[in-house]
Image (tube, helix red, strand yellow):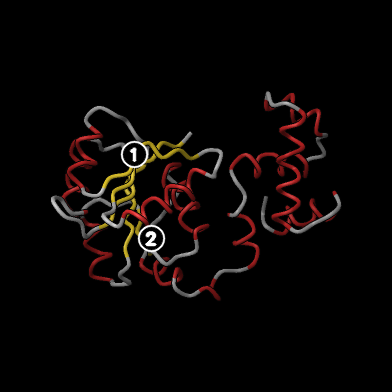
Amino acid sequence: MIRIALADDHKMFAKGIAGLLEEEDDLRVDGIFSNGKDLLDFLKTHEVDVILTDMNMPVLDGAGVLEAIKKTSPKTKAIVLSMYHDEAIYNRSMKLGADAYVLKNSDPDELIYTVREVFEGNYLPSYSKLQQQTESDEYTDYYKLKFQLSKRETQILRMIKNGMTNKEIAASLNLSLFTVEAHRKKIHSKLKVSSVSELIRKAIDIGI
């Protein structure tokens, strides 16, 4: 489970992002705060894996949060959420220790993907990625399909591709047969397929 804390003074936006993340099986939002000071106070008594922070906030801004996090909790990953497609702000965020920079108008799947990749230590930030976030035609269909699947759904899809039955998957993951079947229905729906052969072909197409 990836534990997340979020700081943004736009409460409606923050709650919306938290709700989006909470829909994923492997993501949990432990705190939502309207300024950086409240976030840092929370982190004195709670451990999280990833923080999401706006750069412009009252009391203590995102720059202050990044500086403090890297000193007091260097293992905690930090993602900047910003409405500004600006290379100077991006570079400043990276210099202060941000692990990623995501635009607020990005596809929700991009944020979910970034949280997971940053947590795993696989994300390599670059300004070109920021540019891609505003150019939806840069994303291929397979990219969108792949990252709308949850971590558990991806795991189950990989097992299906490898020829495992629902019962075998349930036993391997210590899940009930009903849970595996429910995940499988979601996978079929998200990938828009109706047969096992189509499902396996789609899994191969999107690199799973």
Residue drawn at 30 percent across, 57 percent down: 10
In the picture, measured across the screen, residue 127 lies left or right of residue 205, that is left
21, 65: nearer the viewer: 21
Marker disc for residue 102: 2
Residue drawn at 66 percent across, 40 percent down: 155
In the picture, measured across the screen, residue 63 lies left or right of residue 136, that is left
20, 196: nearer the viewer: 20
Residue drawn at 42 percent across, 67 percent down: 105
Residue 37, percent from left and from top: 17, 43
In the picture, measured across the screen, residue 21 lies left or right of residue 185, that is left
Secondary-structure class at tag 1 = strand
Residue type at mark 2: give it: Val
Residue type at mark 1: give it: Gly
In which quadrant of the rendered view does residue 177 lie? top right
Residue 109, percent from left and from top: 52, 57
Q: Is residue 83 above or below residue 66?
A: below
Mark 1 → mark 2, Cα distance in angstroms: 19 Å
Residue drawn at 52 percent across, 38 percent down: 26
201, 17: nearer the viewer: 17
Q: Residues within 10 Å of mark 2 (few under 14, many from 20)?
A: many
Residue 125, percent from left and from top: 37, 58
Residue under label 1, please give it: 31
Q: Is residue 130 above or below residue 158?
A: below
